Image (cartoon, rainbow, N blue to C red):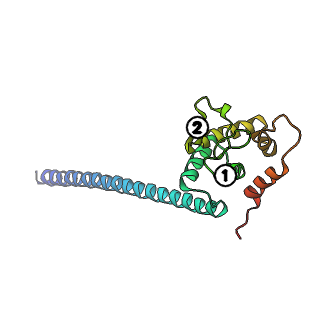
Amino acid sequence: MENNKKQKTKIRKSYSFSEEKSGLIFQEIIIYLFLCVIAWVCVDNIREYYQDYRVKQEYSRYQEQYPWLTWKIYEVTKQETDTQQVPTAWMLAIINSESRGKQYAVSAAGAIGLGQVMPFHYQGRKEALFDIDLNIHLSVKVFRACLVQHKFNLVRALNAYEGRNNRSDVNVHYLSEIFNNIYFYDKK
């Protein structure tokens, strides 16, 4: 009988130990999940900070190259080029050659704004092409179409963007200025 009592007591102790142990495991899981959430939030904040820092560094570098560059023009250009998969450096070099960053530029041929968009590329009022967002959106869209049409040959795409699509001659000054800005710019 006494042996049975000892066994029952032993069983009860091991059973209560299991309950305590499972309670501790549950607490450890909760703490682990809480720490994972905190780590995820921290990593996400660090990633956002790094991206913002990198974008601001890139803006500063481009602003040294293009003194006319404002945050608004850069931000819209960056967003549009990322969306339409065109290098930002290419589009900024085109804007520099086309208008020198003048929002209200109008060419002798009638091209309008920063990217010198021809009014036939837009079905609305041509005055709307002076809007930075719309002009850059259309400029990138037209340039992307030129790139696709010419199988991503940059020289031919720039020739087409300039309006010399069906001509065999090229504007050497225009092309060399863009290529210098894209590939050979050096801070002085």
7 relative to 112, above or below: below
102 relative to 110, above or below: below
Tell me the residue at 73%/66% (across/down): 186
Q: Earlier in the sequence, mark 1 or mark 2?
A: 1
Q: Label for residue 127?
A: 2
Tell me the residue at 69%/40% (across/down): 111
Q: Quadrant of residue 164?
A: top right
Foreground residue among 131 and 65: 131
Q: Are marks 1 and 2 in contact (CB under 8 Å)?
A: no
Q: Position of residue 132 (x, y in %)?
A: 57, 45
Q: Secondary structure at mark 2?
A: helix
Q: Position of residue 73 (x, y in %)?
A: 57, 51
Tell me the residue at 52%/56% (across/down): 51
Q: Quadrant of residue 34?
A: bottom left
Q: Is residue 38 left or right of residue 164?
A: left
Q: Label for residue 179?
A: none
Q: Is residue 23 left or right of residue 67?
A: left
Foreground residue among 99 and 147: 99
Residue identified by numbered label 1: 92
Q: Residue furthest right?
A: 168
Crowding at dot 2, Cα within 10 Å, few <14 / some 14-19 / many 20+, comes out as few
Q: Residue furthest left?
A: 1
Foreground residue among 51 and 12: 51
Q: Secondary structure at mark 1?
A: helix
Give the mark toward the camera: 1 or 2. 2
Q: How far apart are the two marked residues, 1 and 2, measured between alpha carbons?
A: 22 Å
Q: Is residue 10 left or right of residue 74?
A: left
